[in-house]
Image (spheres, rainbow, N blue to C red):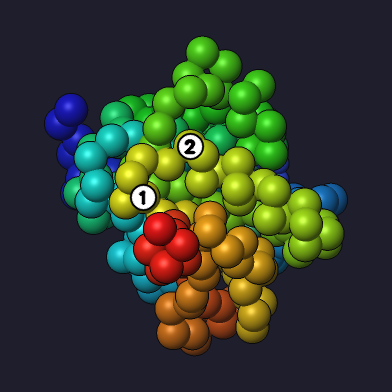
Amino acid sequence: MDVDMADNSKILERDAKHGDFGPFLANWVRHPISMGAVAPSSRDYCRTMVEHSSVDLDGPILELGPGLGAVTRAMLERGIDPGRITSIEFEQNFASALKKRFPEINVIQGDAFDLDETLGERKDEKFAAILFAIPITSQKASWRQDLFRNYFGRLRSGGNITQLSYMWKPPVPAVPGIFSVHSSDIVWNNIPPARVWIYEPDLAFSEIDA
Ligand SMILES: C[S@@+](CC[C@H](N)C(=O)[O-])C[C@H]1O[C@@H](n2cnc3c(N)ncnc32)[C@H](O)[C@@H]1O
């Protein structure tokens, strides 16, 4: 699918400068726990997230918690075919804005914590990468691990999960035999400074175990 990248990024740059901070903050005031952040992620941060994601693997890409599309934009700027991207956003207003902004992307308004329901007929699809930006640290560690275990079952071989987080330790503890976790350097140019957490299949464990 052909996309006019230059036009698209101009529109997004303008929206990010003048339009996104207000709606983002307003939503944070109403839903501080599910929003997590007071401002959209910075361009540098989003680029770092995409760089560490397994988006170069063939296949569809799943973005969870896109907000107003800061990470989505970074994927498009990297030249990813918008037809590969499915973005799941819970907030109706954000999902509608995202659909207008990125008509070529498959935006679903729904719950990323219940992908069987939200993906519907596509629930058995395997993804090349999952980019995750939903605050979950208020949940129990075992709940978070179960969630990511479920997500790992939806990845193609070689796929990973990248997570946006301001935490200084892994927001989801590793599950031996299923996934390990490490982080990028801190991206200081972000409010607040944050790391990308990278979750990969725990191959070391299965090799030792084999
Ligand atoms: C911290 S913001 C990240 C927005 C954007 N990706 C960024 O980096 O600027 C978290 C987003 O996740 C969405 N969200 C929260 N809970 C969700 C859920 N259960 N399913 C889907 N989206 C959810 C929020 O509405 C919000 O847009």
How many labels, in total?
2
Q: Is 163 on the left-hand or right-hand side of 86?
A: right
Residue at image mark 2:
154
Looking at the picture, does residue 119 appear above or below residue 196?
above
Q: Which mark is residue 159?
A: 1
As shown in the figure, which amino acid type bears the numbered disc 2? Answer: Arg
**Where is residue 125, by image quadrant?**
top left
Residue nearest the viewer, comparing 130 with 79: 130
Give how far across and how far down residue 35 sits, in percent: 72, 55
Give me the residue at 60% from left, 41% from top.
150
Give how far across and how far down residue 190 sits, in percent: 52, 77
Q: Which mark is residue 73?
A: none
The 10 Å Cα crowd at callout 1, few under 14, some 14 to 19, many 20 or more, is many
Res. 61 in view = no
Q: Residue furthest top?
A: 121
The 10 Å Cα crowd at callout 2, few under 14, some 14 to 19, many 20 or more, is many
Give how far across and how far down residue 153 sits, in percent: 51, 39
Give me the residue at 61% from left, 30% from top.
115
Looking at the picture, does residue 38 appear above or below residue 149?
below
Secondary structure state at the residue bearing disc 1: strand
Q: CA distance from mark 1 to mark 2?
A: 9 Å
Q: Which badge, 1 or 2, comes first in the chain's sequence?
A: 2
Give how far across and how far down residue 110 sits, in percent: 65, 29
Residue nearest the viewer, comparing 10 with 190: 190
Q: Is 78 on the left-hand or right-hand side of 195?
A: left
Q: Quadrant of the N terminus?
A: top left
Residue nearest the viewer, comparing 200 with 188: 200
Q: Residue furthest front?
A: 210
Secondary structure state at the residue bearing disc 2: loop
As shown in the figure, which amino acid type bears the numbered disc 1? Answer: Gly
Residue nearest the viewer, comparing 37 with 132: 132
Q: Quadrant of the C terminus?
A: bottom left
